Amino acid sequence: MMPFRSTKFLLWVGAGLALAAVVLYAVLWFVFTREQSRVLAAASALADAEQARISDTALRALLYETAEKRTLADALFVGNVDTVAFLKELEMVGVDAGVSTKVVNVAKAESIEDADARAEAGLETLAIAVEASGSFSGTHRFLALLERLPRPISIRRASFARGDNGVWNGVFELYVLKIK
């Protein structure tokens, strides 16, 4: 009867060892998959950080390379604090043309369909009314110089009238883009 007992004992020991092996395998599998997911998350975070670094480097290079062009493009618009300087520039154009100028009106002018698009771009339109007085050729030259200013200016209205004293008066309504 002894051999039967040892066989039964060996069977229980074998079953216990098999169960322990299955439990150990399950624990090791759980630990391995958990560590693997942590490694994948860390690798993904590193890849995202590297991509962000590359993107930042490329953006810095782009900003550096286009700084001069952006400065030239900004010069096309009246700056957010340069309205008075632009009005003085208009007066200097009048001096160059040989006429006396007077800024009559400055107002924000937006059509409803353009207002939203320009606001999203950070721009607004200024409506400026300027009077010029002098000779006909000087007043006409003032208009020609306005058209040649290095800014996108739209001349909405231009009128010439000769006064009683022989002096020509011109009234010009301009639209110019301004950075908000």
Image: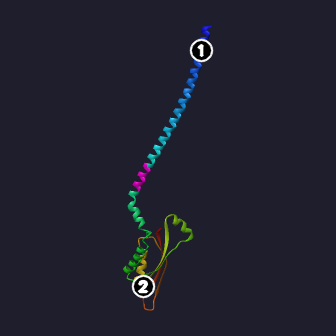
Name the residue beneath numbered marker 1: 9
Amino acid residing under circle 1: Phe
Q: Quadrant of residue 130?
A: bottom left
Amino acid residing under circle 2: Ser
Question: Looking at the picture, how far across and down is residue 118, in whole percent?
Answer: 51, 66
Using the image as rendered, state which of residue 172 and residue 4 is in the foreground: 4
Label 1 CA crowd tier, 10 Å (few <14, some 14–19, many 20+): few
* Residue at the spot 50% in from the left edge and 41% down from the top edge: 41
Is residue 1 at all visible to an observer of this figure?
yes
Left or right of 65? Residue 161 is right
Q: So how many labels did they put on this image?
A: 2
Residue 146 forms part of the magenta stretch: no
Left or right of 102? Residue 11 is right
| For the residues bearing labels 2 and 1, Cβ distance under 8 angstroms | no
Q: Quadrant of residue 78?
A: bottom left
Residue at the extreme top: 1
* Residue at the spot 58% in from the left edge and 18% down from the top edge: 14
Disc 1 is placed on an element classified as: helix
- In the image, residue 46 above or below residue 69: above
Disc 2 is placed on an element classified as: strand
Name the residue beneath numbered marker 2: 133
> Which span of residues is magenta-colored?
53-62
